[in-house]
Amino acid sequence: MSGLTEDQKSRLLERFRSLSLGSAHLSAAHARMLVAEVDAVLGGVVEPEPRAEPVVPDGVVTIACDGSCLANPDGPTGWAWVATDGRSDSGGLANGTNNIGELLALINALEAHPDTALHLQLDSQYVLNSATKWIPGWKRKGWKTASGKPVANVDLMRRLDELLRAREEAGIPTTWEWVRGHNQHALNEEADRLAGEAARLAR
Amino acid sequence: MSGLTEDQKSRLLERFRSLSLGSAHLSAAHARMLVAEVDAVLGGVVEPEPRAEPVVPDGVVTIACDGSCLANPDGPTGWAWVATDGRSDSGGLANGTNNIGELLALINALEAHPDTALHLQLDSQYVLNSATKWIPGWKRKGWKTASGKPVANVDLMRRLDELLRAREEAGIPTTWEWVRGHNQHALNEEADRLAGEAARLAR
RNA sequence: GGACACCCAGUCAG
DNA sequence: CTGACTGGGTGTCC
């Protein structure tokens, strides 16, 4: 009924990193993610009940995207994505906003998987709605907001639109899921950690 | 360079309790406070350097307020205040939050000193800012938070406002000081002790 | 008016 | 290390 000790965690982490799965080995990000899972399960934090999660078909890669911004307007900003195919990436800039971080996470995830069917997990309704709902309307109205003001972060929005149109034209499936932030969702938590780390490094 | 042994502490405590200062004698709370001071000084924990502390004018009573809550939301909750006039009080309730404890400490201290110029020491910025900054704004906006949600613990906040307005109308001076928690600040430590005791008794 | 996110600060505890 | 109670602020959209 209890979780792992710190010692057990680090030993597990080392073990996971040295494992071979087929020809590949686990990334550091995924090893940490797995340790967190084991810890949660052993600690009774997650019930073994069937989870009401979307069923992701075989061959589809799930990616969690997240951003971070210390001192929100204009502070050090980080972005990160973590995928179930074992890949992950992150980066930062010296000045940005929380929403720029979230946008960059998605854009970088898409750029890294141009030919892969994806299931995208975001915690930002701003980015999720931009990608799935608002961009078409903005384009029709010359990138103007509902209240007539220019859409923020237009350059990033245009790039996002470009990437999504390319996927659509190539017939590459893309599905979306909103996940609440900080909800012991292993993929998202790891993306959160990496994004925060990247923001701190960009300081 | 070393502090007191437990034996030394209890002997000191007994000694302090039997002392006469003018016609009064030390309360148990203040005796413990003094012993803690001696211990800290002998242990080299506090430097004998001149401290940058507010100078409290003669006739002004300093009061440290503190709250405690075991198992934070909804657990046994205690409050306490300790004053330099030798008085102190504490109490508890079966269910509360940490912040309710801190609020009750201040409210009870004010109620016990309606006509005394006070210097109030709090470790809770939540309560300190409520009392000195936020209440006026909340009243203007119908007790709504900056993010539009109803202010928590409104009943206690209203009572606090009432007490402070009464003091102001009567022209009774009130000054405020934030002290970091658990910083060998004798008055605060004693209030902390009493609040914890009260919480355990309320269990 | 609503929603999500990013922080900052303090406290209470395990 | 974990979690909760509370407040302030900004970024963004409808």
Image (cartoon, coloured by chain):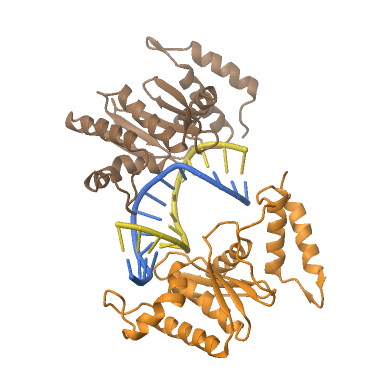
Chain colours: A orange, B brown, C yellow, D blue
Q: Is residue B159 left or right of residue B102?
A: left
Residue A143 sits above or below residue B22 on the image: below
**Camera-side residue of A60 and B85:** A60
Q: Which sits in the foreground, A121 or A80?
A: A121
A9, above or below B151, in the image: below
Q: Is residue B4 left or right of residue A27?
A: left
Corner quadrant of residue B159: top left
The residue that appears at 46% across and 40% down in the rendered structure is B49
Q: Identify the residue at image location x=48%, y=75%.
A: A103
Q: Measuring 81% from the left and 68% from the top, which residue is drawn there?
A: A18
User: B9 or A133: nearer the eye?
Assistant: A133
- Quadrant (top left, top right, bottom left, bottom right) of the N terminus of chain A: top right
For residue A74, what is the image quadrant? bottom left
* C9 left or right of D2 in image: left
User: Quadrant location of residue B60?
Assistant: top left
Q: Position of residue A118 (x, y in %)?
A: 60, 77
A19 in relation to B190, above or below: below
Spot occupied by residue D6 in the image (x, y as percentages of width and height)? 40, 45
